[in-house]
Every structure is written in structure tokens, then in C-alpha cells.
Image (cartoon, helix red, strand yellow):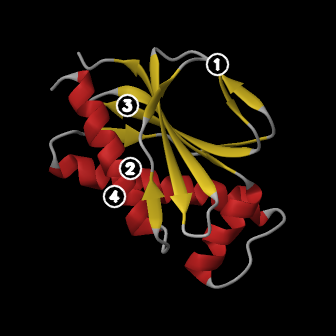
Amino acid sequence: MSTSKHVQLILNGTIASLTSVIPAKLDVLSPTMTVQPYEQKELSVLIGLVGGIKGRLILETSADVIGQIGQSMFGMAIEGEMIESFTGELGNMVAGNLCTLLEKEGLILDISPPTVMTGTIKFFGFKQAFKLPVRLENGSMLNVLLTIDEAPE
């Protein structure tokens, strides 16, 4: 399977996974290629991908958006120290669901534990990256960044 087919499967699977995990109407905007460094502004979770392709899945947003997602999922406010913890768990849920969806398509991936990053951070060290902006029903934004490090062997 080609790298472009893998990328298409992963992006489509990520959309399906986000839709399944987040109980809100999502408006997925067109993906774009992005170059390094990619700069996050506030909060993200990084999940490493290995197997059929090597790369990273990064969900980038703000503490306010994470709080809103937590509120919609659990009916209670997510704030303070729970923001970072829930960000990691959200990344785990999305990536785990993604792997299950991709396995049905014949693409086997393993994921790393989530790494939560706060503040302004620049990401380097990827061959190519795709940014998928997602607008939640209240207008807030979540960016999915898929970085590709190596094509399958």
C-alpha cells in the first residue's frame, strides 16, 4: 500500500474516530500540507505511530476546548490539573479507536503512550505533515496533525 493511501486511510480514520469519541457535531475542514517547524500555541497531545507507517498523530487545541469536550463527554467541568490528564486520555481514545478502524482496512499500527505538551512549542523532524482543522459545533477549533517520518518498507 502506498504512503498516500496510508495517509488517506489515517486521516479518514481519524475523522471517524473523533466523531465516535467526541459527542458533538464536528465540521472537518480541508486538510493541508504543512512544513516544519509546526508551531503549537497552547496545548496538544502527541501519539507515536509505528507499524504500517511511522509517524505521529498530534491533537492540538486550547485548554478551553479540552474543557468543553470534557463537559460534553462527562457532563462536568474539566479544569485545572485535569485538563492535561484529560488531554492525554482523549489522545489515547482517538488513537486507540483509529487503530481498531485501520485494522479492518488492513493497516496495522501500534501507538505510543500519549505525550501532553503545553505552551508554545515548535515541532521539527518529520518528512511531511498534514494538518486537518476540525471545527466543533460551538465554533472552537481542534487541529489534527499527522506527521510522516518513514514510508512503509
Q: Where is residue 148 in the image (x, y as percent from the top left)?
A: 42, 23
Residue farthest to the bottom, as pictured:
75
Q: Is mark 4 on a helix, strand or loop?
A: helix
Q: In this view, does 63 lie to the left or right of 44?
A: right
User: Around disc 4, counting alpha carbons within 10 Å, would you say few (fewer than 14), some (14 to 19), or many (20 or more)?
Assistant: some
Name the residue: 71% across, 25% down: 122
Q: In this view, does 81 lie to the left or right of 26?
A: right
Frontmost residue, 42 versus 113: 42
Question: Which image quadrant: the N terminus?
Answer: top left
**C-alpha separation, residue under disc 3 versus residue under disc 2:** 16 Å
Of the two numbered discs 3 and 2 on the same chain, state the one appearing first in sequence: 2
* Dot 4 and dot 2 residues touching (CB under 8 Å): yes
**C-alpha separation, residue under disc 1 versus residue under disc 2:** 22 Å
Q: In this figure, which residue is indicated by the disc labeled 3?
A: 50
Q: In this figure, which residue is indicated by the disc labeled 1?
A: 37
**What amino acid is at disc 2?**
Thr
Question: Which image quadrant: the C terminus?
Answer: top left
For marks 1 and 3, give the one nearer the viewer.
1
Of the two numbered discs 4 and 3 on the same chain, state the one appearing first in sequence: 4
